Image (cartoon, rainbow, N blue to C red):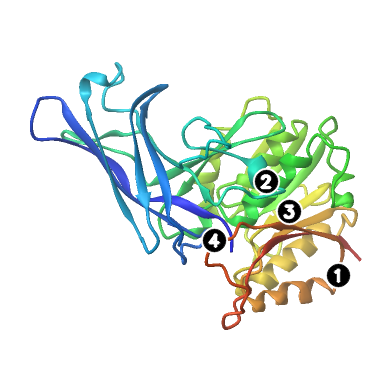
């Protein structure tokens, strides 16, 4: 089936409570859905809600998500006397599945990429709100963004990535993207991996250049840039993704050498001069084939980027969602060969079934491919 994501349907908002002076509650409404937002999480699970200010935890409570839920309200009452000097601005609400005793506890809102690949033991991905800010008279609220916090195995860093909470799915974290990020992290300090052609270009001690297409919020490219500190990574997408992507660039460790965002429209006939199309070692894309209407333009972009750079490795992370996506592979056959493929398992909910559903492919795994120009 895939991963499910905690999402704020209503940004956390502070309001005074009736009663003793200094009594407040932070209220939000959250849901747990698939990356596309079209399927609700069907198992029952306990969610730990943590209200914090800086490193200080103000309140924790457990909220139950039950089978059949579509959303859950969360109220966090507290006394303002418990808040540090920052006041009502700067409060953050984190939502995480309650861990088992075996798993242990990480800091609030953090998930480990090593539990996503190679053996996925995470079903539900945690979420943290932005900090509350003064929005009007006596009104403090968070913005319409959610932060994903992913701990990297290679460096021990926590990669923080903002994504949008609205209907614009282009600014979300997707299953193939989080799998590819975990794959890159898993093999970063190893001499090789299942995709040997890819790993011949990846070396933490050597410089290389990578271009990501359809980067969205930038998770994959930022992971690559963080675990390979000598890399130069270009995140590319349409102009509407630039603000979010650049916000996430600001969160990357200062030890990361070179990572930048460039606008790239697949329908343009020319590659912008700011993108090193003739010298890139790796060109990658994750979950970019779901919209078959844009697939021909995506394939043309791969062709333009490799026309004078036939040694470049094209890396694709693909979660099969519909049989019409086969169009991508049919078009790629004209100028590219599949060099290697490996499959990364996806978690399954208790009611997961193998049956095909009207052209919908039951995704059991994310397929990782490398291509080379013919």
Query: Marks 4 and 3, how far apart in space?
Result: 29 Å
Label 4 or label 1, whichever comes before in sequence order? 1
Label 1 or label 2, whichever comes before in sequence order? 2
Label 1 or label 3, whichever comes before in sequence order? 3
Image quadrant where one finds the C terminus: bottom right
Secondary structure state at the residue bearing disc 3: strand
Residue position for label 4? 349
Residue at left offset 26%, top offset 20%:
82
Label 4 or label 2, whichever comes before in sequence order? 2
Q: Nearer the viewer, mark 4 or mark 1?
A: 4
User: x%, y% of residue 154?
Assistant: 72, 32
User: x%, y% of residue 238?
Assistant: 57, 56
Residue position for label 3? 284
Q: Nearer the viewer, mark 4 or mark 3?
A: 4
- Is residue 54 placed above or below 149 in the rendered structure? above
Q: Nearer the viewer, mark 4 or mark 2?
A: 4
Residue position for label 1? 335
Q: Nearer the viewer, residue 182 or 1?
A: 1
Q: Nearer the viewer, residue 319 or 202?
A: 319
Q: Residue furthest top?
A: 85
User: x%, y% of residue 334?
Assistant: 85, 74
Residue at left offset 33%, top offset 39%:
142
Image quadrant where one finds the N terminus: bottom right
Label 3 or label 2, whichever comes before in sequence order? 2
Query: Marks 3 and 2, how far apart in space?
Result: 11 Å
Query: Marks 1 and 3, how far apart in space?
Result: 16 Å
Does the residue at mark 3 contact the one at mark 2 (Cβ under 8 Å)? no
User: x%, y% of residue 335?
Assistant: 86, 70
């Amino acid at each position: 089936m895939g991963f499910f994501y905690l999402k704020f349907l209503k940004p956390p908002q502070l309001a005074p409570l009736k009663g003793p002076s200094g009594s407040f509650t932070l209220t939000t409404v959250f849901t747990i859905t698939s990356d596309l937002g079209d399927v609700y999480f069907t198992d029952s699970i306990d969610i730990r809600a943590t209200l914090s200010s800086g490193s200080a935890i103000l309140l924790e409570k457990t909220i139950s998500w039950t089978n059949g839920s579509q959303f859950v309200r969360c109220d966090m009452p507290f006394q303002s006397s418990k808040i540090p000097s920052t006041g009502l601005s700067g409060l953050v609400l984190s939502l995480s599945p309650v861990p088992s005793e075996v798993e242990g506890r990480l800091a609030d809102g953090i998930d480990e990429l090593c539990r996503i690949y190679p053996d996925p033991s995470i079903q539900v991905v945690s979420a943290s709100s932005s900090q509350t800010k003064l929005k009007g008279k006596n009104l403090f609220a968070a913005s319409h963004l959610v932060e994903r916090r992913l701990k990297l195995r290679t460096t021990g860093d926590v990669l923080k990535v903002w994504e949008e909470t609205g209907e614009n799915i282009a600014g979300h974290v997707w299953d193939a993207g989080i799998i590819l990020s975990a794959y890159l992290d898993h093999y970063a300090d190893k001499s090789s991996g299942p995709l040997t052609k890819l790993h011949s270009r990846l070396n933490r001690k050597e410089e290389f250049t990578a271009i990501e297409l359809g980067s969205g919020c930038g998770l994959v490219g930022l992971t690559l840039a963080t675990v390979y500190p000598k890399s130069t990574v270009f995140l590319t997408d349409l102009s509407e993704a630039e603000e979010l992507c650049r916000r996430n660039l600001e969160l990357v460790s200062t030890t990361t050498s070179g990572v930048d965002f460039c606008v790239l429209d697949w329908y343009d006939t020319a590659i912008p001069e700011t993108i090193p199309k003739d010298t890139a070692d790796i060109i990658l894309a994750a979950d970019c084939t779901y919209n078959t209407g844009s697939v021909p333009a995506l394939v043309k972009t791969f062709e333009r980027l490799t026309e004078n750079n036939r040694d470049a490795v094209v890396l694709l992370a693909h979660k099969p969602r519909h049989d019409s996506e086969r169009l991508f592979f049919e078009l790629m056959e004209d100028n590219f060969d599949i060099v290697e493929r490996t499959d990364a398992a996806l978690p399954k909910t208790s009611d997961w079934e193998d049956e095909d559903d009207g052209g919908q492919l039951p995704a059991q795994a994310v397929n990782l491919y490398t291509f080379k120009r013919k």
